[in-house]
């Protein structure tokens, strides 16, 4: 059986930190895993900025409440789930995800937790496990699933490498240039075609 593993931000929903940066005017918060390959470094940078500006989870949640999935994402996800098992593998946080997961009809999501103090300050984060995306793919493969994966950023490339088939979706030019071995598209219908084309259940 085939399992499709998808990244979340940049693939199905807008980048949460970019949306938050636009609302707060903190340009430095626009950096994402498309720009910084080291996720720990990126998160420490983000948390330092939140502390400097005295912003916490409530302020981030208020922005997330205004967000919606990317155009066509919910229909794309629903169509995949008719034929495949689908798992979202994301470096976002469960504390962020509920409003957007509701709009995507509650897909299975593997991500991380924030450490939040009583006053709403985000004091840290807890990764689900080391190398979480490719570890999840390897675990699914150990259960005799064939894994087809798609993502957009540096933090997705280990997942794509571990998967039986991997694709880049809506990636920036720098990521596409560094990983030319992966087919790339910006269109949900074309990505669905890529997935169907390599599936053992094709036809």
Image: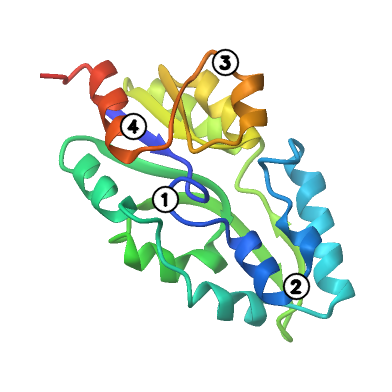
Which is more N-terminal, label 3 or label 4? 3
Q: Looking at the image, which residue sits at the far top?
A: 181
Relative height, residue 84 to residue 58 (above, below): above
Which of discs 4 and 2 lies nearer the camera? The answer is: 2
Q: Which numbered marker is on residue 12?
A: 1
Pointer 2: what residue?
25
Which is more N-terminal, label 2 or label 1? 1
Q: In which quarter of the image is residue 142?
A: top left
Q: Which numbered marker is on residue 191?
A: 4
CA separation in Å, label 3 and label 2: 34 Å
Which is more N-terminal, label 3 or label 1? 1
Pointer 3: what residue?
180
Helix, strand or loop at mark 2: loop
CA separation in Å, label 1 and label 2: 24 Å
Q: Looking at the image, which residue sits at the far bottom?
A: 119
Q: Quadrant of residue 99?
A: bottom left
What residue sits 23% from the left and 24% below the top? 196
- Residue 103 at x, y = what percent? 33, 66
């Amino acid at each position: 059986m085939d399992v499709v593993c998808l990244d979340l931000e940049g693939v199905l929903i807008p980048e949460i930190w970019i949306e938050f940066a636009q609302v707060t005017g903190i340009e430095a918060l626009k950096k994402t895993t498309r720009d910084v390959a080291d996720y720990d470094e990126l998160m420490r940078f983000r948390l330092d900025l939140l502390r400097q500006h005295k912003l916490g989870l409530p302020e981030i949640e208020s922005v997330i409440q205004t967000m919606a999935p990317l155009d066509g994402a919910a229909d794309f996800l629903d169509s995949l789930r008719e034929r495949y098992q689908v798992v979202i593998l994301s470096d976002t946080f469960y504390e962020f995800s509920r409003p957007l997961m509701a709009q995507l009809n509650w897909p299975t999501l593997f991500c991380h937790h924030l450490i939040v103090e009583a006053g709403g300050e985000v004091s840290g984060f807890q990764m689900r496990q080391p190398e979480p995306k490719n570890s999840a793919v390897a675990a699914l493969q150990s259960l005799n699933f064939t894994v087809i994966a798609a993502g957009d950023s540096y933090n997705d490339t280990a997942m794509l490498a571990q998967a039986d088939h991997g694709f880049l979706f809506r990636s920036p030019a720098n990521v596409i240039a560094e990983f030319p071995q992966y087919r790339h598209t910006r269109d949900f219908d074309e990505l669905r075609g890529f997935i169907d084309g390599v599936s053992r259940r094709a036809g």
